[in-house]
Amino acid sequence: MKRLPAFVFLFVSTAGFGQSLAASGTETTGWALFRSYAPLLAVLIPLVTYLTAQYKDWRSAQGTLNKAFQGENDAVVYMTHKVQHNEWKRRMKRAPGFRREVITALCLAWSVQRLDYIKALIFDALLCVGQQGYADETQFVLDKLLRQYQQYHERFEAAEFSGVIGSMEQLKVALAAGEAERAPKNQRV
């Protein structure tokens, strides 16, 4: 049997109490009605405040990811900072879709980025993602992007795409080497 949160029982019991007052035929004043719903309001106001803050955080993260997908440098730097300092660690663990978006945004940012210092931040952020246990998922995303880039390169004979493909292949090899270095010595092959 599923357990319901305590505030649901509080809501049901408080609403029932207010309805029973009204149904009993006794005249209820505004103050008595307010007093009967006060416990409900005491729960609802902080709950709404908490949910609003969570929603704003979620929207901020989505905006950052969207900007990072577009390759804006300040968004990429902000996102790498969040990943490097494990500020999204719980969220990445809880929400696989969000985690996949972060990894994809980092890989796409790598593919369009021309500045070396930002590429260094992206590389470190991807290593941090690997340290959190998502190295295989990062390699999967890189493989998928490489397949897409190679298909485009072959179908449309896009010669300028060969540099991007080479850069992505280098990233894939470097991440695999970085993971091998961080593995404990007794687990190395």
Image (cartoon, grey):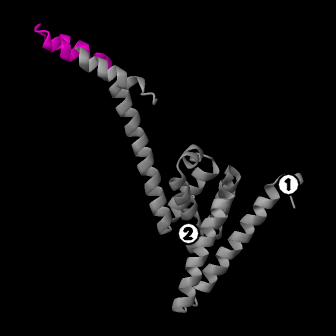
Q: Residue lying at the far front in this picture: please name it.
A: 1
> Could you tell me the amino acid type at mark 1?
Gln
Percent of width and height locating residue 82: 57, 50
Q: Secondary structure at mark 1?
A: helix
Q: Is residue 21 magenta?
A: yes
Label 2 – label 1 distance at C-alpha: 31 Å
Name the residue carrying label 1: 187
Residue 33: percent from left, percent from top: 19, 14
Q: Amino acid at mark 2?
A: Leu
Is residue 25 visible to the viewer in this orientation of the structure? yes
Q: Nearer the viewer, residue 125 or 3?
A: 3
Which image quadrant: the C terminus?
bottom right
Main SS of residues in magenta: helix
Range covered by the magenta-colored residues: 18-41
Is 29 left, or right, of 164 in this rendering?
A: left
In the figure, 120 relative to 79: above or below?
below
Residue in front for this viewpoint, 61 or 28: 28
Q: Residues within 10 Å of mark 1 (few under 14, many from 20)?
A: few
Residue 115 seen: no
Q: Which residue is mark 2?
A: 108
Q: Is residue 100 left or right of residue 169?
A: left
**Residue 159 lies within the magenta run:** no
Identify the residue at image location x=34%, y=20%: 10
Q: Is residue 55 left or right of residue 129?
A: left
Horizontally, residue 152 falls left or right of residue 57, namely right
At which x and y percent is residue 71? 50, 68
Q: Quadrant of residue 35?
A: top left
Q: Residue furthest right?
A: 186
Mark 2 or 1, nearer chain start: 2
Q: Is residue 19 above or below residue 144?
A: above
Residue in the picture at 43% in, 56% down:
63
